[in-house]
Amino acid sequence: MRCFFALLCLILAASPAHAARLVAVRTFTAPGQARLLLELDPGEESTPATIQTRASPPLGAIAARGITWLGGVELDADLPVEVPVHTDGVRRVLLAVVGAGVQVTVELDQARLVRAEQIDPRAVIVDLLTSADSGSTTDGSKTGEGSAPPSAVSDELPTRAQLLAVVQGVDLLRAAGGARKTRPVVVLDAGHGGWDHGAVGPNGTREADIALQIVLRAAVGMRQRLDADVILTRDDDEFVTLRGRARIANQAKADLFVSVHANAAFGPQAWGTETYSMDTASDRGAQRVAARENAIARKEGLAEGDDLLAAQLINTGTMRLSRELAAHVQSAVCQRLGLVYGTQSVHDLGTKTALFTVLTRTQMPAVLFESAFVSNPTDERRLRAPYFQQTIADALVDAVGAWLDRQGDGAEESP
Ligand SMILES: [Zn+2]
């Protein structure tokens, strides 16, 4: 018996209990600057990672590099090893296991200073800055400490507080923003919440949780990249009625409304991404999806006929804009997923229409986005991955930005 306990203790001591894991990398760029958010799952022990940084100048055909090594951190299996960027002098980000840690290499058009700091057990920020003193360049041996003072971090890049909000799932920015008329007002609606879990996957993944994560991430992106006023129908695991969600958007006189969900089917086979705008159901499958998402409406005392009636009050111009928004969302998401995971791992189910209660009561262009199937084991695993959630969120920002640009270009060529 003593031997058994001794052995057990030995095993417990020898196996490090769930080391921290790098689960997502997010790149933000501005001219001459880049800021990376490295998201960690701290595991059981939230000891800070050992961080080393190194800059290397271009060498022949080899690009300049900014290298950050996180000691004691593992690499999440769902993360792609290469993330193409190609903006503001940043070519791509490469991830690799090096020694007892993860190396994050940023390929650059020219040498930059690298600074990295862990701001939370879940977050490391890496800054890649051109030196303020343009005469001096990094010589490959510097670590970013003690060399020429780098220029201040551009206000085009997200602040530490904003990045902290991303990893903490806290919507700090909502409190700060007051609606200004010149900025687009976007309402993001995380489906379900509270006692309404939405669909639940074979491994227990709850649609409500996934929808919230995607929405929180998209909100940060839309404020940063689109300078939009973003209003969330919920920023927590709380129950909001379908009518209540539409009311929030209508009262805010939002420019558009995006409801985020995860799909579910009876069997495990169905997988992929689809986006709905409001109209009578385009096919039987669309009808089933609407019936599932509308189930909560019956508890609110709304009859099925109410949706049709409400839908008839929406003018055709709004319906056309909703269809355009759905097309933007669908193509942006499939494009981003294809870029990150490869086109063979994208299942584009296209855009469809159905009578969703939440859409029939919003008075602005509105879509309902079904990110992936929580009922399919592969889709479910992806939905849980922060990197997948971020990729989807980035695509939603792309889509809304492109759609807003089109409205701005005076696309009002109605007959
Ligand atoms: Zn749903």
Image (spheres, rainbow, N blue to C red):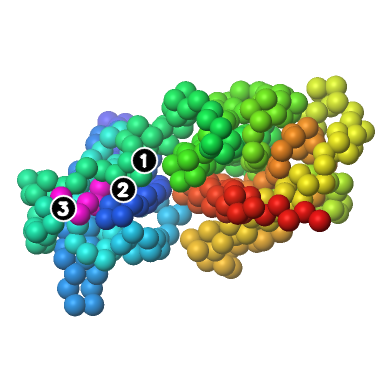
Span of residues in magenta = 127-132
Q: Is mark 2 within 8 Å of ligand 1?
A: no
Say above or below: 64 vs 248.
below
Question: Residue 128 in magenta?
Answer: yes
Image mark for residue 158:
1
Q: Earlier in the sequence, mark 2 or mark 3?
A: 2
Pointers 3 and 1 in contact (C-beta within 8 Å): no
The type of residue carrying mark 2 is: Arg
Residue at the image point whose x is 17% and y is 58% from the top: 55
Residue at the image point whose x is 22% and y is 51% from the top: 129
* Residue at the spot of label 3: 131
The answer to whether residue 372 is left or right of residue 174 is right
Distance from disc 3 to disc 1, alpha carbons, whole Å, reads 20 Å
Image mark for residue 299:
none
Residue sitting nearer the eye, 365 or 128: 365
At mark 2, the secondary structure is strand
Q: Earlier in the sequence, mark 3 or mark 1?
A: 3
Residue at the image point whose x is 81% and y is 56% from the top: 415
Residue at the image point whose x is 77% and y is 51% from the top: 320
Say above or below: 103 vs 196.
below
Residue 272 location (% of width, % of height): 66, 56
At mark 3, the secondary structure is loop
Residue sitting nearer the eye, 389 or 217: 217
Residue sitting nearer the eye, 361 or 234: 361
Label 2 crowd bin: few (<14), some (14–19), many (20+), radius 10 Å: many
Residue sitting nearer the eye, 343 or 228: 228
Quarter residue 19 falls in: top left
Distance from disc 1 to disc 2, alpha carbons, whole Å, reads 8 Å
* Residue at the spot of label 2: 35
